[in-house]
Image (cartoon, grey):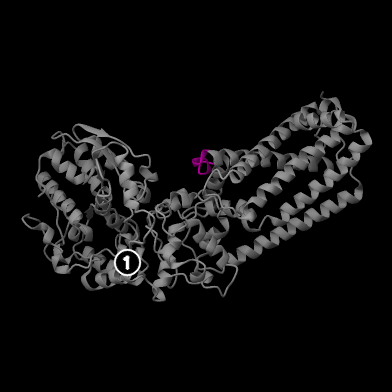
């Protein structure tokens, strides 16, 4: 078995002219692919400058290697993950096998014999089986419509067809080669030998097998060259662009909206950043973003994948306005929940691009009347609710609150926010927090009527200039009072303080009230042993859980409640389903087949819980409305602060 006779004569049955033709065509095909990639990358670099990457080149390379090795992101869909694993590793094994054959045939190295040959033959055949099995799984899902999210475009399925033909011709030409003289050691090529045996069984002799081998070799060679040439094209290119996209991820929290790198907004492809243009080519069309999108689930006109594919089409025509490719009703239906970003297996920031398209619409004066009304209210009254600014402290009626004097240094600022000041559901949260702060004898201060909107709604709806104006007003207040720490019950305010004001040079320590409450429980200052919480399910606010990774503290506070029967919804934590309020949707209210909050309320009811706990005033408001759509046995909606007040026996009225 270890002798040099246990091998094969590479290219033995292939005429020299065919070999020369193949090598020339393969070299030309690779050259065409390289030139096409260079041209595409050069086009990417004509976009706006992207924010600096948080990783070094070594860090990016390590991230890509880990990404490709373990397929963790892809395996979040078990079926697609298994199919991709088999296809990827099968292809890798076949590629390595091809390289071994090339080295043996075209270099002075001589190693492809004996145990090396037979073990390689076995591994390569098994790799080929895995390769074809993975492709068959993809083909089955596409043919059987096993997933509604699959894009039916022919150019997507063509990659599976081409790779499948390469794999099949590889096995059949191996079978024809073995069938010429049926050497005993080729039994280790388990698939090829079995097929060769079948060929001999049907009466194919040595000469016919030799001719068949040459025909199949030529067909296999043509298919391989075609693969090289098509590699930069459309869906084929995701194999390269997807890895590049993962390597250049921003590393920011999902809810941290990037600042414009130039004049705000995108109306043409030149307004997109380098990373945006890369993402447009990296999209695998898998549809996971569509499947996770609450707007699409509710039957609204937003399909996140089609946003990215629309940008891809836009890059092909310099004179094409993006608004002609991406309809207005789609971008205004987005709740900015970030589920698309979380779901994307190649790290595309979808919702950032939607907001940038909104910015472009705002700059051209094309906005829905509801958005315009919000902008006017924010500019005139410093809140998006259309309420007089003089009513900002009406929530405090009957309470003794600690307002800061002008320029008084503040160690702990309790930031109430617009929802906590003007929305009835938000006001009850604010009052509960005041009861808790007083009960704990916490030294805090409010800004009272001088508090103004953080600018979050304006920025999410694309009015970047208004956001900058309001943000700088807030930052001036923080600096005037030398604020050390900010406490807020609103995840949207929390996100802006934590992630977006640093873009403007203001860094302040900020704590969400779920984190604050948990700290009080851990220190023994809140015992929460009064009352009986009963069956409670937690709704994770998008801007808190998925957006900033804060998923444990709300649950730990809940678990501290007396008599708690905590029941998780199927979608929770970072995979939570949106309440439907974010991104200005509280005011825009794009119609769909069903309301997002009704879907979430029904999911919560399905747990059998009598109470939905949340940690966001917007979530509380929309879920309360959603529960009103339930005819019988609707749960009530309470903020964590209200549940804590009840457990401590405090009055929040």
Q: Quadrant of the N terminus?
A: top right
Image position of 410 (left or right of 288): left
Q: In the image shown, does 261 or 639 lie closer to the viewer?
A: 639
Q: In the image shown, does 250 or 436 lie closer to the viewer?
A: 436
Please identify the quarter of the rendering in which residue 479 is found. Answer: bottom left
What is the x, y in percent for residue 386? 22, 68
Q: Which residue position holds label 1?
A: 458
Q: Which residues are magenta?
A: 70-78
What is the x, y in percent for residue 598? 32, 50
Image position of 286 (left or right of 560): right
- Outermost residue, top direction? 1
What is the x, y in percent for residue 532? 16, 34
Q: Is residue 263 visible?
A: yes
Image position of 524 (left or right of 283): left
What is the x, y in percent for residue 330? 44, 63
How many numbered circles are shown?
Answer: 1
Say if the magenta span includes residue 435: no
Within 10 angstroms of label 1, few (less than 14), some, or many (20 or more) residues? many
The secondary structure type at the circle numbered 1 is helix
């Amino acid at each position: 078995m270890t002798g040099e006779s246990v091998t094969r004569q590479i290219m033995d049955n292939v005429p020299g002219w065919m070999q020369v033709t193949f090598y020339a065509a393969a070299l030309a095909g690779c050259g065409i692919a390289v030139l096409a990639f260079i041209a595409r990358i050069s086009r990417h670099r004509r976009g706006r400058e992207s924010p600096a990457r948080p990783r070094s080149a070594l860090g990016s390379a390590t991230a890509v290697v880990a990404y490709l090795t373990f397929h963790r992101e892809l395996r979040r869909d078990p079926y697609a993950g298994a199919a991709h694993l088999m296809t990827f590793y099968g292809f890798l094994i076949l590629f390595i096998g091809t390289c071994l054959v090339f080295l043996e045939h075209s270099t002075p190295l001589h190693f492809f014999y004996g145990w090396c040959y037979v073990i390689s033959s076995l591994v390569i055949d098994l790799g080929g089986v895995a390769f074809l099995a993975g492709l068959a799984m993809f083909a089955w899902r596409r043919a059987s419509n096993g997933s509604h999210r699959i894009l039916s475009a022919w150019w997507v399925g063509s990659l599976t067809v081409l790779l499948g033909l390469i794999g099949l011709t590889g096995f059949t030409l191996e079978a024809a080669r073995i069938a010429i003289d049926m050497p005993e050691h080729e039994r280790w090529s388990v698939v090829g030998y079995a097929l060769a045996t079948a060929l001999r069984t049907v009466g194919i002799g040595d000469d016919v097998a030799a001719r068949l081998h040459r025909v199949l070799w030529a067909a296999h060679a043509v298919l391989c060259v075609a693969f090289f040439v098509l590699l930069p094209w459309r869906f084929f290119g995701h194999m390269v662009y997807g890895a590049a996209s993962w390597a250049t991820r921003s590393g920011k929290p999902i809810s941290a909206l990037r600042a414009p790198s130039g004049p705000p907004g995108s109306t043409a492809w030149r307004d997109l950043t380098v990373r945006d243009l890369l993402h447009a080519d990296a999209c695998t069309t898998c549809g996971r973003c569509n499947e996770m999108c609450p707007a699409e689930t509710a039957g609204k006109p937003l399909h996140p994948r089609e946003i990215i594919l629309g940008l891809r089409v836009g890059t092909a025509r310099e004179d094409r306005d993006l608004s002609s490719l991406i309809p207005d009703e789609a971008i205004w239906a987005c709740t900015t929940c970030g589920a698309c970003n979380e779901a994307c297996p190649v790290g595309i920031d979808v919702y950032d691009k939607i907001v940038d398209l909104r910015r472009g619409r705002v700059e051209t004066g094309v906005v829905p009347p509801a958005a315009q009304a919000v902008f006017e209210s924010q500019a005139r009254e410093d809140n998006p609710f259309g309420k007089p600014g003089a009513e900002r402290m009406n929530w405090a009626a009957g309470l003794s609150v600690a307002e800061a004097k002008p320029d008084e240094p503040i160690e702990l600022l309790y930031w109430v926010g617009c929802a906590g000041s003007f929305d009835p559901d938000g006001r009850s949260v604010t009052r509960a927090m005041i009861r808790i702060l007083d009960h704990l004898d916490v030294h805090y201060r409010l800004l009272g009527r001088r508090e103004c909107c953080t600018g979050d709604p304006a920025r999410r709806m694309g009015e970047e200039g208004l956001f900058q104006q309001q943000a700088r007003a807030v930052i001036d207040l923080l600096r005037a009072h030398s604020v050390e720490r900010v406490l807020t019950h609103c995840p949207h305010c929390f996100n802006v303080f934590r992630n977006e004001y640093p873009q403007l040079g203001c860094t302040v320590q900020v704590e969400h009230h779920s984190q604050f409450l948990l700290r009080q429980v851990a220190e023994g200052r809140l015992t929460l042993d009064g009352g009986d919480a009963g069956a409670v399910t937690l709704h994770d606010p998008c801007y808190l859980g998925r957006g900033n990774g804060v998923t444990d503290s709300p649950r730990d506070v809940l678990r501290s409640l007396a008599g708690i029967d905590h029941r998780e919804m199927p979608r929770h934590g970072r995979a939570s389903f949106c309440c439907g309020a974010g991104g200005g949707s509280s005011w825009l209210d794009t119609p769909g087949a069903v309301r997002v909050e009704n879907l979430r309320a029904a999911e919560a009811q399905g747990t059998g819980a009598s109470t939905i706990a949340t940690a966001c005033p917007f979530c509380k408001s929309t879920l309360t409305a959603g529960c009103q759509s339930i005819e019988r046995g609707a749960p009530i909606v309470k903020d964590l602060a209200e549940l804590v007040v009840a457990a401590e026996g405090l009055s929040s009225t």
